[in-house]
Amino acid sequence: MKRAGWKQKIQNLSCGELMLNPNQKRFLMITLGVVEDELRRLKELLRDEREEGLFSRIKDDIGLEEKNLLNEKIDYLIVHLINLKKLFDLSESEFVLRYIVKATSVYLLIQLEETMSCRLKGRGEITPELKETLDPKLNEMRSVLRQMESMV
C-alpha cells in the first residue's frame, strides 16, 4: 500500500520539480518573487492616479498608448511567472505584517539617527540653531517609531 502511494506521488510530480534541488528551487522562488514585485510596482507607476511623495515625484513622460503596451507586456510576463510557479511547484513566501512593521520601524529609526545634527557634522559645520531646530523634531519622530515598534 505504501509503495503504491509513493509511486502515485512520483507520477504526480511535474517534470519541472524534478529539475531543481531544494536550494535551486528556493533561489528561483525568491528571484521570481522579486520579479513579480517589481512588475506589480511598474503597473502601479503606470497608473494615471498614484500618490506622490513629499521628497520625490514621478515625472510621467509616457503616453497612454505606450502605457497600454507596457501593461500588456507586464501582464504577459506575469502569466509566465504563474506558469513557472506551477511548473516548478513553487510556494509563496509568507511575510508576517507584525514583523514587517517592527523591521521597518527599526530601519527608519536608524535612518533618522543618521540625520541627527551630530551626524551631520561629518558633512560640514553645523550651527547651534540647526541642533535646536532639527534634533527635537527628529527625536519626536523617532519616539513615534519606537511606539509603533512596541505596539506590534
Image (cartoon, rainbow, N blue to C red):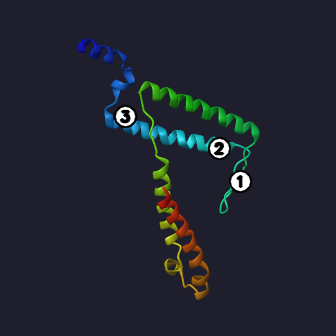
Find disc 3 in the rendering and name its residue.
25
Q: Position of residue 148 (x, y in %)?
A: 52, 61
Q: Which mark is residue 59?
A: 1
Q: Which mark is residue 70?
A: none
Distance from label 2 to label 1 (Cα)? 14 Å
Q: Quadrant of residue 137?
A: bottom right
Which residue lies at the image location 70% right of the left edge and 49% below the top edge? 50
- Disc 1 residue crowd, few under 14, some 14–19, many 20+, Cα 10 Å: few
Q: Earlier in the sequence, mark 2 or mark 3?
A: 3
Distance from label 2 to label 3 (Cα)? 28 Å
Q: Is residue 8 left or right of residue 93?
A: left
Amino acid bearing label 1 = Lys
Q: Position of residue 15 (x, y in %)?
A: 37, 20
Amino acid bearing label 3 = Lys
Looking at this view, name the residue that lies furthest to the front.
151
Q: Is 102 or 119 nearer to us in this picture?
A: 102
Q: Is 60 or 26 nearer to us in this picture?
A: 26
Q: Which mark is residue 44?
A: 2
